Image (spheres, rainbow, N blue to C red):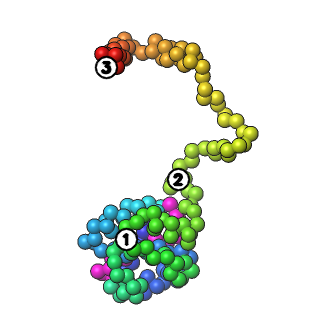
Amino acid sequence: MVKEVSGLAEFNSIIEKNNVVVVDFYATWCGPCKFIAPAFEKMASQYKQATFLKCDVDRNQDVSQAQGVRAMPTFIVFKSGKKDATVMGADARKLEAAIRSAAGPPSQDSSSSHSWGSGNTLGSSTTPSSTVTKNPTETARSVLNGFSDLDNGMKTIVVLITLYVLYIVFG
């Protein structure tokens, strides 16, 4: 979740109380700020160990001046209350690299990441749980068996598409 900063006192308090804080200094009229905003929101959902803030430079001039912000967007990553990194411009890769450097890898949370299985290490002796390879005869049989299960309307469509492809290829 991204919190909107409402003043210098609140900003300083958040920086002091949290280990890693990522701040997006933006302006409502700034095109690049609008462009990178979804990526910033996504990173906030992935890096739950960090606190994410947005600071409108027009409404919070005291905060942006105190931090030396001269361009929008500017992202500042704080670690243990001190500036750890500054990224100027809408460069999501640089921003994520700065966040990862300060906060570590993204949080492992079921709501923000997908599990695609444990995988195998190259060179390991572990075999996959199911064999994927089939010989051509088995593959043809399984296709024909699937074809016989179709209703007549679908069989007609498959035959017409096959004839069309053959006409295009050998035409």
Q: What is the x, y in percent for residue 165?
A: 34, 19
As measured in the structure, the alpha-carbon distance from the residue carrying label 2 to the one carrying label 3 is 44 Å
Picture coordinates of residue 51, whole percent (x, y): 49, 72
Residue at 30% across / 16% down in the picture? 171
Instruction: Identify the amino acid type marked 1.
Output: Gly
Label 3's element? helix
| Front residue of this view, candidates 38 and 166 | 166
- Cα–Cα gap, marks 3 and 1: 50 Å
Asked whether the viewer can see residue 157, the reply is no
Tell me if residue 14 is in the magenta stretch. no
Q: Which one is in front, 171 or 50?
A: 171
Q: Quadrant of residue 42?
A: bottom left
Where are the magenta residues, as a range? 46-60
Mark 2 or mark 3: whose residue is earlier in sequence? 2
Residue 9, image x, y percentages:
42, 87
Report helix, strand or loop for mark 2. Answer: loop
Write down the residue under mark 2.
113
Give the mark nearer the N terminus: 3 vs 1. Answer: 1
- Front residue of 170/140: it is 170
- Residue 74, visible in the rendered structure: yes
The x, y position of residue 23, in whole percent, is 43, 75
Disc 1 residue crowd, few under 14, some 14–19, many 20+, Cα 10 Å: some
> Mark 2 or mark 1, which is nearer the start of the sequence?
1
- Residue 166 sits above or below residue 100 on the image: above
At 58% from the left edge and 66% from the top edge, which residue is drawn?
104
Question: Mark 1 sits on what residue?
Answer: 89
Q: Which mark is residue 168?
A: 3
